[in-house]
Amino acid sequence: GICSTLRLNRTFLLYFALKLAFVEQVADKIALPILIDDAFVNFDAQRTNYIVKLLEELTKKTQVLIFTARQDLVSSLELEPIRIEKEQ
């Protein structure tokens, strides 16, 4: 239900914040890429826009790889995606 979705979103945000903090802490020793696999699938437009702004800042410092099926996220990032589609 809606409560479990909200809990899942908060859990993801906490996990994402911890990963970013770790990447920031070790940045002077090693440049780690950030891998994101359809993590924003349950986010509404407002949260997605916030994440897009955050990702734009992150790409100035480190490599960010995003795997997603969300066309709106691809459009928001204004990047040319690499498409890999399953054969039918």
Image (spheres, rainbow, N blue to C red):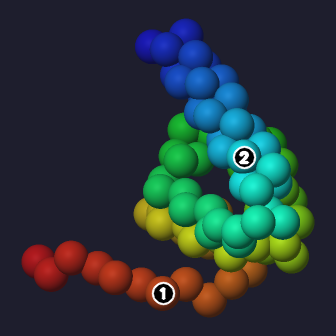
Counting from the top left corner in percent of width and height, residue 46 is at 80, 42
Counting from the top left corner in percent of width and height, residue 21 is at 78, 44
Q: Which residue is mark 2?
A: 22
Q: CA distance from mark 1 to mark 2?
A: 27 Å
For mark 1, give the secondary structure: loop
Q: Nearer the viewer, residue 70 or 16?
A: 16
Point out the image quarter for the C terminus: bottom left
Q: Nearer the viewer, residue 38 or 59?
A: 59
- Asked whether the viewer can see residue 44, the reply is no
Counting from the top left corner in percent of width and height, residue 70 is at 52, 61
Q: Amino acid at mark 2?
A: Phe
For mark 2, give the secondary structure: helix
Q: Which residue is mark 1?
A: 82
Counting from the top left corner in percent of width and height, residue 33 is at 63, 69
Query: What is the quadrant of residue 28 in the picture?
Result: bottom right
Q: Residue furthest front?
A: 29
Q: Amino acid at mark 1?
A: Ile
Residue beneath the point at 86% across and 59% down: 53
Callouts 1 and 2 close, C-beta under 8 Å: no
Image side of residue 66 versus residue 54, left or right: left
